Amino acid sequence: MLFIIILNILYASTFTIGKLLLINSGPIFVTGLRMALGGLSLLVYSLFIKKEKIKNLILTKQNIIDLVQIIIIGNFISYVFDFIALKHTTSIKVSFLYNLTPFISAILSYFMLNEKINLKRWAGLIISFLGCLPVLIEHANQETLITNNFFISWPEILLIISVATYAYSWILMRKMINYQNFSPIIVNYSTMLLGGLLAFPASLIFETWQPIPDIKTFVFLLFLIVLAGNIVFYNFYGALLKKYTVTFIAISSLMCPLFTAILSHIFLGEQITLSLFASNLIVFLGLYIYYQEEK
């Protein structure tokens, strides 16, 4: 259980570190750096440690279409929207709403892969959605509502799109790994690297590039987020799957927003509210009901 806690602390730290990185830098630029460096790190790991062989892979037209979608949708749009939302709202809210990923994946799989969802699972999905409402309604000071009569803000809309595109990319990745015999490391480093490189021209167009006030702090934080989120977390997660079920790890991931809340309160001064705990309990209930059907 200690390793599960460490896994969630690692993931939680990426939201806090990401928020610190965005204080003096543009979200698209940070996305490009993080994904490109993460992809390069996995490439080195794959070639020189795992010694993965890519010459035997056969790319079909469908493979290429799936890879391009993961690059653009899962590693560019998803992370850019995530970092834009993170810049304009709290890291606690971003971490919490990413708990919706397995539910959105289930709904997308229902339409894309014809995976069945029985009444009990639909009940779990609905309960979890309702559990998110308290956090959505409670806005941070820097958030701007779409209209005065609408309770969702622009950062929240971008965040929901980010979670949905992230979930969609994982469905494509699962299809490539399970049905097309692709190595998860190869899919990850190729899409991550190319998605990161795609962010740089977008940053040049949409962001104003300015010298970073404290380059040492920026590099240190960038190193931490790549190490924690793109290298250690990925390999640690894979190792834990040999000991624990996917279901157990999915349920335990509800600890992540609580760890994010603690870290962000210490390092960012973000407030921990009762609505976070209430929402987390309701989402946990929905997740528990949903995963009772897992074998």
Image: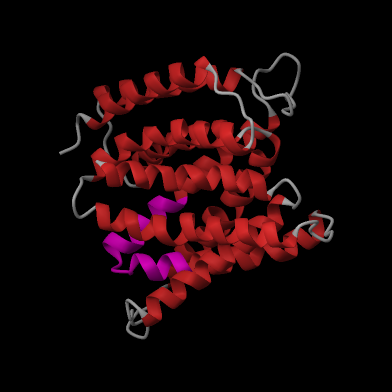
Relative placement, left or right, of 254 versus 21 is left
Residue 84 location, x and y as percent?
Answer: 68, 44
Quadrant of the image for the N terminus? top left
Relative placement, left or right, of 256 versus 150 is left
Magenta stretch, main secondary structure class: helix
Q: Can residue 30 be seen in this view?
A: yes
Q: What stretch is highlighted in magenta?
A: 169-189
Q: Which residue appears at 60% of the width and 18% of the height?
A: 137
Q: Which residue appears at 44% of the width and 70% of the height?
A: 42
Relative placement, left or right, of 291 versus 146 is left
Q: Which residue appears at 44% of the width and 64% of the height?
A: 188
Q: Which residue appears at 52% of the width and 37% of the height?
A: 263
Residue 120 location, x and y as percent?
Answer: 25, 22
Q: Nearer the viewer, residue 136 or 9?
A: 9
Q: Residue furthest bottom?
A: 55
Work out whether 97 lies above or below 69: above
Q: Quadrant of residue 224?
A: bottom right
Q: Which of 99 and 234 is in front in this view?
A: 234
Q: Which of 58 and 219 is in front in this view?
A: 219
Residue 143 location, x and y as percent?
Answer: 72, 28
Q: Count how many numbered circles sit on residues in the image.
A: 0
Work out whether 13 lies above or below 124: below
Work out whether 150 lies above or below 231: above
Is 239 covered by the magenta stretch? no
**Which color scheme did the rendering employ for the protein?**
secondary structure
Q: Can residue 130 be seen in this view?
A: no
Residue 129 location, x and y as percent?
Answer: 44, 23
Quadrant of the image for the C terminus? top left
